Image (tube, rainbow, N blue to C red):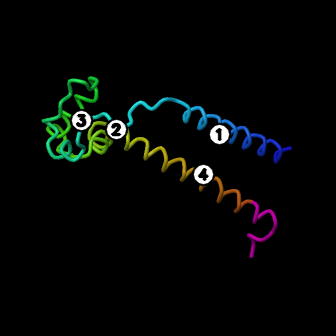
Amino acid sequence: MKKFLTWVSLAVIFVAGIYACVTMAAMPRTYDGQNANVSVYDLSRDPSSYDDSTADGAAAAIIQQNLEKTHAVNDVTSIVFDFRGYDTMGEAFILITAVAGSMVILFTHKEKKGKEDGKGEE
């Protein structure tokens, strides 16, 4: 019964993933890069010269203020490590704790099983 539920749950996840991929592929593109007058190279060299008259408020603020506040050329890196550094550190701590807890559970189970079989005693 346990194997059956495992296979059914994997099948549901697989079908849901395929459905999500097909649905997202059918959606119109939000940005294709064809009609933009933005040179990525020039933008990375001088972000203060970026014309943000057509950009939304968040994009304009990130592009204009990133270099002055963080001194990081890459916007994603500056957001993850400078603006959300404590959040990223907390997520890493939670991940390490989960892995360590899983390892403790797995190794404890193996030790108990070995002692019950008589393999743990000398």
Towards the viewer: 27 or 47: 27
Q: Which residue is mark 2?
A: 33
Return the residue at label 3: 37
Q: Secondary structure at mark 4?
A: helix
Q: Quadrant of the N terminus?
A: top right
Residue 14 image point, x, y percent? 68, 42
Alpha-carbon distance for marks 4 and 3? 51 Å
Identify the mark nearer the N-term, 1 or 3: 1
Q: Residue at x 38, y 36 (%)?
A: 32
Alpha carbon separation for disc pair 1 and 3: 35 Å
- Tell me which label, 4 or 3, sits earlier in the chain: 3
Q: Are marks 1 and 2 in contact (CB under 8 Å)?
A: no
Task: In the displayed orientation, state which residue is furthest to the front.
Answer: 35
Region rendered in magenta:
113-122
Residue mark closest to the camera, 1 vs 2:
2
> How many other residues sit within 10 Å of disc 3, few (<14), some (14-19) or many (≥20)?
few
Type of the residue with mark 1: Ile
Nearer to me, 112 or 54: 54
Sort mark 1 into few (<14), some (14-19) or many (20+) by Cα contacts within 10 Å.
Answer: few
Mark earlier in primary sequence (4, 1): 1
Amino acid type at mark 2: Gly
